[in-house]
Image (cartoon, coloured by chain):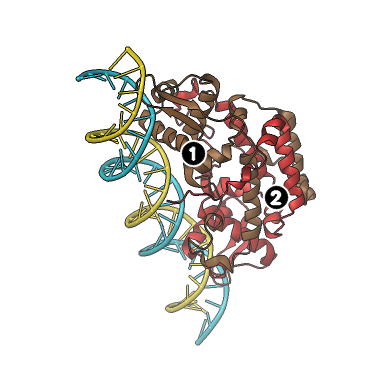
Chain colours: A red, B brown, C cyan, D yellow
Amino acid sequence: MLGLSKKSDYALLALSYLATNGESRTVRTKEIAERFAIPAELLAKVMQRLAKMGWLASSPGPSGGYTLAVSDTSITVGDVVRAVDGGSALTHCMQSPEASGCEQWANCTIRGPLGFVNERVQDVLNHIPIRDIRERATPASAESELVKLVARDHSAPAAARRAGASRSRNEGDTP
Amino acid sequence: MLGLSKKSDYALLALSYLATNGESRTVRTKEIAERFAIPAELLAKVMQRLAKMGWLASSPGPSGGYTLAVSDTSITVGDVVRAVDGGSALTHCMQSPEASGCEQWANCTIRGPLGFVNERVQDVLNHIPIRDIRERATPASAESELVKLVARDHSAPAAARRAGASRSRNEGDTP
DNA sequence: CTAATGCCGACCAACGAGGTCGGAGACCTG
DNA sequence: CAGGTCTCCGACCTCGTTGGTCGGCATTAG
């Protein structure tokens, strides 16, 4: 349902927490887990993967824990989702075209276009570093600007026509 | 895993097919199913939902089928995903904050920022009408412009620093 | 009337997500 | 120096959602 998993959620949480509190101090998984009231074991697993990616430095034993090993500007939301969730493509075809044995490859007329949509989403995710996550920025001005841009780029009249499209956020979809 | 479901996939397929081939002709579900080699029953279910949304006009009986009831510019990818998949929020908190009983509401420091990321993705999806899906447009110019915009809006140096972020599309993620 | 189509609900199977368990190494304490 | 404890680490398991299927009913063209 086009939502990022809890693992990615936790990863972003932990990363932002480390970026804020763990500048040079080692932070235990338990600390983060208790701070956000999330299952420690699951978060531990997420931390392991983040460490394996080289983004976290781990030190075992008491007074051990994790430290942010890289700059908070060098990892993006897209990177995290891709690492923790294992791929972040919209469709299955786009991750491994031949591996998944997509029969419709020849028939699929929207493969290219949907891939285009995919790239859009990926780009958005790939250009939001975790620093922005912790900085809690929600500038309305930038948002409206992006809307304009996205609408304009290759289908200005179409998007302009519908105008009030985003209103259908939460209608009647939970039976 | 931040991927749209097959149902959404099929919905987009059918919609684009109807927009192209079914201008005023009624198209049977079977025809689309065979065309794209997808399970007819599942697609039928999807079609029903699309019809119930008022986007498709259905006519029963022999020589019956579906017709696109609205302009191909008045429905966006976001609309379809939301209708077929049932909600398209990135996190569970964002769909029904109090319903899902999110304990971390007070603790969650990234709720706002992640919501911001969520809105970004939603905006992208909400401003790509199905017409663009069928037109298979992949203008590189527009893309680069969007990248600039997304990067610039509130964290120019951060995004500028990493620059080559999108290279990590398909690395080593399928063990 | 018959056949073909959409319509609707219930049902089942499988994959993946979410969560849990026991181990191995490292630090601290006595 | 030795034991205990705390940490990371990897494998394991359960459960829910998703994808997919089946049957029966209403409707309409031929």
Residue A56 position in % (x across, y down) = 61, 57
Instruction: Identify which residue is drawn at 66% across, 47% down.
Output: B120
Q: Is residue A6 visible?
A: yes
Where residue B167 sits in the image (x, y, percent)? 66, 37
Asked if A172 appears above or below B38 in the picture, the reply is below
Tell me if mark 1 has few (under 14), some (14-19) or many (20+) residues whose alpha carbon lies within 10 angstroms of its own.
Answer: few
CA separation, marks 2 and 1?
Answer: 43 Å
Q: Secondary structure at mark 2?
A: loop
Residue type at tag 1: Met
What residue sits 50% from the left and 42% below the top?
A: B83
Give whichever of B58, A51 is nearer the camera: B58
Number of marks present in the image shown? 2
Closest to the camera, between mark 2 and mark 1, is: 1
What residue did someone put label 2 on? A74
Return the mark for residue B53: 1
- Which residue is at 49% across, 57% downward? A45
Q: Position of residue B150 (x, y in %)?
A: 73, 44
Is residue B88 or residue D11 the one in the foreground? B88
Amino acid carrying label 2: it is: Ser
Q: Chain of mark 1?
A: B
Q: Residues within 10 Å of mark 2 (few under 14, many from 20)?
A: some
Q: State the image coordinates of residue B47 (x, y, percent, origin top left).
A: 43, 32
The chain letter for the residue carrying disc 2 is A
Q: Is residue A29 visible?
A: no
Query: At 55% from the left edge and 54% from the top edge, which residue is drawn?
Result: B91
Q: Left or right: where does residue A71 sit relative to residue A118?
A: right
Q: Is residue B99 above or below residue B165?
A: below
Q: Is residue D23 above or below residue A126?
A: above
Secondary structure beneath label 1? loop
